[in-house]
C-alpha cells in the first residue's frame, strides 16, 4: 500500500518517538544506578545487575525479533514492545527491592529490542529508494542522539526531582505513543515463517554467557577466576553447537547468503568495530572522566555529553541527505577520517587541567563523526540486504549490542590497567624524602595527611592514565577504518559485488 506524505510523516514520528525513548533509557539509567545502593539495600555489584539484566534480556529479544515481525507484522510488534516497555518503566519507578527492579529491567530489555528492530524496519519501509539516507538519518536521532541526551536528562531529574523520575518519564510518552499508534498505524504485510528453536536456544546461551563474562570480568578478575572461565567455556561450546545445528538445518536462524555481498559484510564489520569496539568506549569513558576526574556533578557532566550530542543529531540528518544525493561510502569515509583525527590528536589530550569548555569543544568532532556514521552505514547494509530487512536489522543490532558490550569491557579493563600502571610509575619516580617532608608540613595529623596524599596520587594516576585509555579506544577506530577503505576495493571473492 502506497502511503501519503502525511502518513509517512505521522508514522515516522511515532516510530522515532518509540525508538528515541527506548535507546535513551540505556544511558539515562547509568546516572541513577550508583545512587540505588542505599535505597535497595545492596552494594555496587548488586545494582550492576540493573544494567546487566536489561542487556541480557535485550540480546535474546533481538534474536527472535525477525520471527515475530514476520508472523505478526512490524506495527503490531512495535506497539506490543512499546506497551511492555512503558509498563516495565512504571514498575521500575515503583520498585523498592533489588529483585523487583531487576525483573522489571528484564521486561524493559526484552521490549527495547522489539521496539528498536521494528522501528528500524518501519522507517526504512516508509521512504522510497532515493530517500533511504534521510530515512536512516531520522532514525539515527533515536539510535545515536538519544544516548547523548540520556546523561543530561538523567542528571537533571536526579538532581532536582528523584531517581524514580528517570523511569516515570517514560510512562506518559509511552502511553501517548501507543494510543497514537493504535489509532493511526495501518495493518502491514504478514509473511509467516518458522523458527529454529534449537539454534535460538544455543545462540542465546552463548550470547548470555558472553555478555555476563564481559560485564562481570573486571569484578571477578577476568580469566584468573573459575567463574569467568566457566562462562567462557559455556559461551564457546554453545556457539559451536549453534554452528553445527545451523549447518545441518534446512531452516536456519540466520540468512548467511547476506554475507556474500561485500557491502553487507564490510558494513557489519564497520558497525561492529568502529561503533561497538571504539565509539561506545567514549560513550562510557567521557561521563566517567567528567564525574570522577573533573569532579563535576551529574547534571554538568550530562551537559558535557550533550555538547557533542547536539552535533550527532544535526549531522545524522545532513549525512542522510548527502548519502541519498551522492554515495553512503563517501560519507562513511569522511566521517571516519574526522573521527580518527579527533580520537588520535585531540580527545587523548583532555585531562584534569583542561577547561570544561575546551574539553567539550575537543569532543565536538566526535559528535560530527558519529552523526555521519550511522545513517550511511545503515543504508549501505540495508541496500545490500536484498529485501531481507528483518534479518539485516537483527544482525546490525546484534553487532551493535555485542560490540558495545566488548567496547565497554575493554574500556573498563584499560581504565583500571593504565590507572594502576601510572600510579606505580609515579611512585617509582618520586623522591622519597621530599614526599615525606611535604606530608609532614600538611596541616593535618600524619596518618590523615598520608591518606590525603594517597588519594591525590590516585586521582592524578587516573588523570594521566586517561591519555592511554582514550588513545586505545581510538586505535580500535584505526582498525575499523581498514574495512572502510576496503569498500572502495573490488574483490571477486564476493559473489554479488
Image (cartoon, rainbow, N blue to C red):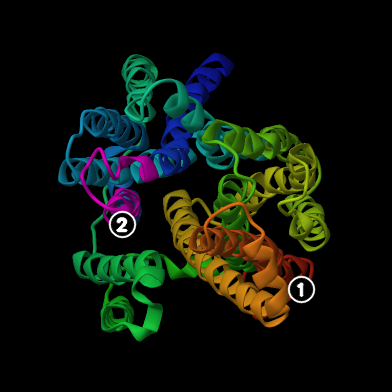
Residue placed at 36% from the left, 37% from the top? 74
Question: Could you say which is closer to the camera, residue 22 or residue 92?
Answer: 92
Question: Could you say which is closer to the camera, residue 349 or residue 263?
Answer: 349
| Residue at image mark 2 | 56
Is 331 situated above or below 111?
A: below
Is 94 situated above or below 440?
A: above
Which segment is the magenta one?
33-56
Question: Could you say which is closer to the camera, residue 199 or residue 92?
Answer: 92
Question: Can you tell which quarter of the image residue 183 is in?
Answer: top left
Q: Describe residue 483's horizontal placement relative to residue 342 as left or right.
A: left
Q: Describe residue 318's horizontal placement relative to residue 424 as left or right.
A: right
Q: Can residue 205 be seen?
A: yes
Q: How many marks?
A: 2
Residue placed at 61% from the left, 52% from the top? 443
Is 453 situated above or below 432?
A: above
Residue 490: mark: 1
Question: Could you say which is closer to the camera, residue 61 or residue 496?
Answer: 61
Q: Looking at the figure, which quarter contains the N terminus?
A: top left
- Residue 179 coordinates in the image, percent (x, y): 32, 16
- Residue 208 coordinates in the image, percent (x, y): 29, 65
Question: Can you tell which quarter of the image residue 438 is in?
Answer: bottom right
| Residue 34 located within the stretch drawn in magenta | yes
Q: Describe residue 120's horizontal placement relative to residue 277 as left or right.
A: left
Q: Secondary structure at mark 2?
A: helix
Q: Secondary structure at mark 1?
A: loop
Amino acid at each position: 500500500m502506497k502511503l501519503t506524505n502525511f502518513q509517512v510523516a505521522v508514522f515516522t514520528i511515532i516510530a522515532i518517538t518509540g525508538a528515541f525513548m527506548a535507546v535513551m533509557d540505556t544511558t539515562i539509567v547509568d546516572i541513577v544506578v550508583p545512587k540505588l545502593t542505599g535505597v535497595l539495600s545492596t552494594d555496587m555489584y548488586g545494582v550492576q545487575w540493573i544494567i546487566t539484566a536489561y542487556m541480557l534480556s535485550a540480546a535474546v529479544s533481538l534474536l527472535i525479533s525477525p520471527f515475530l515481525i514476520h508472523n505478526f507484522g512490524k506495527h503490531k510488534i512495535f506497539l506490543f514492545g512499546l506497551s511492555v516497555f512503558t509498563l516495565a518503566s512504571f514498575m521500575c519507578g515503583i520498585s523498592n527491592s533489588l529483585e523487583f527492579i531487576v525483573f522489571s529491567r528484564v521486561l524493559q530489555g526484552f521490549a527495547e529490542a522489539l521496539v528498536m528492530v521494528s522501528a528500524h524496519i518501519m522507517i526504512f519501509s516508509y521512504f522510497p529508494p532515493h530517500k533511504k539516507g534521510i530515512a536512516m538519518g531520522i532514525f539515527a536521532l533515536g539510535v545515536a542522539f538519544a544516548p547523548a541526551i540520556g546523561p543530561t536528562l538523567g542528571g537533571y531529574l536526579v538532581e532536582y526531582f528523584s531517581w524514580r523520575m528517570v523511569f516515570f518519564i517514560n510512562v506518559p510518552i509511552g502511553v501517548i505513543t501507543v494510543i497514537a499508534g493504535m489509532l493511526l498505524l495501518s495493518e502491514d504485510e504478514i509473511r509467516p515463517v518458522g523458527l529454529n528453536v534449537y539454534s535460538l536456544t544455543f545462540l542465546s546461551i552463548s550470547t548470555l554467557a558472553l555478555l555476563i563474562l564481559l560485564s562481570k570480568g573486571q569484578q571477578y578478575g577476568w580469566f584468573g577466576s573459575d567463574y569467568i572461565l566457566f562462562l567462557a567455556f559455556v559461551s564457546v561450546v554453545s556457539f559451536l553447537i549453534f554452528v553445527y545445528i545451523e549447518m545441518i538445518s534446512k531452516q536456519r536462524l540466520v540468512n548467511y547468503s547476506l554475507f556474500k555481498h561485500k557491502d553487507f559484510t564490510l558494513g557489519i564489520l564497520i558497525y561492529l568495530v568502529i561503533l561497538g569496539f571504539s565509539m561506545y568506549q567514549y560513550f562510557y569513558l567521557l561521563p566517567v572522566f567528567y564525574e570522577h576526574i573533573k569532579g563535576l556533578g551529574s547534571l554538568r557532566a550530562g551537559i558535557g555529553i550533550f555538547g557533542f550530542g547536539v552535533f550527532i543529531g544535526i549531522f545524522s540528518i545532513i549525512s542522510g541527505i548527502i548519502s541519498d544525493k551522492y554515495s553512503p561510502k563517501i560519507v562513511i569515509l569522511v566521517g571516519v577520517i574526522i573521527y580518527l583525527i579527533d580520537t588520535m590528536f585531540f580527545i587523548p589530550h583532555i585531562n584534569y587541567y583542561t577547561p570544561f569548555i575546551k574539553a567539550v569543544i575537543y569532543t565536538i568532532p566526535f559528535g560530527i563523526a558519529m552523526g555521519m556514521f550511522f545513517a550511511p552505514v545503515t543504508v549501505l547494509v540495508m541496500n545490500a540486504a536484498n529485501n531481507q530487512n528483518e534479518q539485516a536489522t537483527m544482525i546490525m543490532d546484534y553487532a551493535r549490542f555485542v560490540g558495545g558490550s566488548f567496547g565497554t569491557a575493554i574500556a573498563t579493563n584499560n581504565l583500571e590497567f593504565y590507572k594502576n600502571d601510572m600510579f606505580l610509575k609515579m611512585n617509582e619516580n618520586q623522591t622519597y624524602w621530599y614526599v615525606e617532608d611535604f606530608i609532614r608540613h600538611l596541616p593535618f595529623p600524619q596518618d590523615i595527611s598520608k591518606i590525603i596524599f594517597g588519594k591525590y596520587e590516585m586521582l592524578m594516576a587516573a588523570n594521566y592514565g586517561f591519555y592511554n585509555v582514550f588513545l586505545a579506544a581510538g586505535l580500535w577506530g584505526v582498525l575499523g577504518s581498514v574495512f572502510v577503505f576496503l569498500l572502495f576495493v573490488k574483490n571477486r571473492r564476493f559473489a554479488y559485488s
